[in-house]
Image (spheres, rainbow, N blue to C red):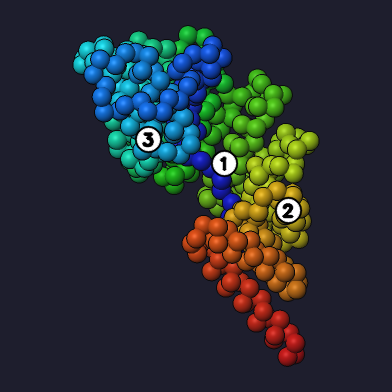
Amino acid sequence: MVGHDSDKNWAPAISTDMMFLRISNEEQKAKGGNAAVVRDGIGLNSLSGADMETSNVLIEEGILAGNLGDYERAYACIDASLKIKTNIYGAEAMNQDIARALSTMGFVLAAKGDIKGAINRYNEALTAKEGSSYTDLAATMTTIGMLHIKCGEYVNAELWLMKALDSKKNMRGSSPASIAKDLENLGDLKKICKKYKEAEDFYMQSAACYHNNINSVKVQKELSCLMSKLGLVAGAQGDYDLAQEHFESALNMKMDVYEENKENSSDLCNAMNSLGYIYAVRGHIREAIQVYEESINIQCNSAWDENFAKTLTSLGILYIEQHDLRSGQACLENALDVMREIDSERGTKGSFICVIMCNLNLCKNRLKQTKVH
């Protein structure tokens, strides 16, 4: 049976570190500044004597190219900008302007798949940011930690994520809510390492940080995600009662959050699928079917993707378990159609289509046996 775990382990932290770049770009546009304009024909090979305005334009062009997925162009622009800044400030200079260029380059390298190179650039950016606010430093530390996770270097990842947490704690006027995400990141790391008890402890600490703002919609979203993660680690430890309790809490929160916009919420469907899965594991097949059917009804109104195919497959298998072979066959055939369409667009054949076909063949064989008897 298909499980659903939609955690994103590292991208959000990188996006956080890059956010100020996009804000900067919008500020320049609002002011009518030249830095927001993409200039064709900027010579990347003849930069001697170039001024700071050219350097800033190159940074903005690099950001735009990166947002469009042209990472080679993005890297070339940012590298050229950094060289100009180095010529202007001096080879040993370290300041916020240099740090910004290095962080941007780190982001582009990560997007290209050069994780080691990205880590090096972010480390250099951190050095250049010396004297910056604790929040700014913590964001870069978090990004470095997440990149180490991407490399499978979990000891280094924990070191950097703990540094980020400590930096936030040292910030003047910091509140428990300001470190909630850092605790959650550490929980994610422990979950990846299959240290489920430690993951649970970090998630519980993170949830406690939101206690005073429970009525905020944003906080409810964060808490519902934490409840889902707590359900996953409880299930991984074999405590299905607790897992069900957490998944039910997560779903109730998400139902409140997305009450007016259910048809566009993949987040809500993931919560339903998780609860349906744990119901099925516990042998509560009818309850599982009911939850999966609700998820299908929502997903039918949105884009058909791989998650939709997985939900159809899970529901089809449950129908088969209940000896409703016709309904099971219909679900699996629909799932197969969705995956074939997806694979056709990708130009590849994914492994999940084999899972669907195996279950579909099993269902058809049982139908034949039923007819014989």
Whether residue 175 is situated above or below residue 364 in the rendered picture: above
- Which image quarter: residue 257? top right
| Percent x, y of residue 134 | 42, 15
- Disc 3 residue type (three-letter): Arg
| Percent x, y of residue 240 | 61, 51
For this orientation, the residue located farthest to the right is 260
Residue depicted at 62% across the width and 66% down the height: 336
- Disc 2 residue type (three-letter): Cys
Cα gap from disc 1 to disc 3, whole angstroms = 38 Å
Cα gap from disc 3 to disc 2, whole angstroms = 39 Å
- Which image quarter: residue 214? top right
- The local secondary structure at tag 1 comes to helix
Depth check, front residue: 193 or 304: 304
Instruction: Note whether residue 173 is visible.
Output: yes
For this orientation, the residue located farthest to the front is 41
Cα gap from disc 1 to disc 2, whole angstroms = 26 Å
The disc placed on residue 129 is none
Q: Which residue is mark 3?
A: 73
Q: Are marks 1 and 2 in contact (CB under 8 Å)?
A: no
The local crowd at label 1, few if under 14, some if 14 to 19, many if 20 or more residues have their Cα within 10 Å, is many
Query: If you read the primary sequence from the N terminus, does the residue marked by circle 1 or circle 2 appear first?
Result: 1
- The local secondary structure at tag 2 comes to loop
Disc 3 or disc 2, which is closer to the eye?
3
Depth check, front residue: 37 or 261: 37
| Percent x, y of residue 284 | 71, 59
Q: Which residue is mark 1?
A: 229
Q: Which residue is mark 2?
A: 300
Picture quarter with the C terminus: bottom right
Depth check, front residue: 88 or 171: 88
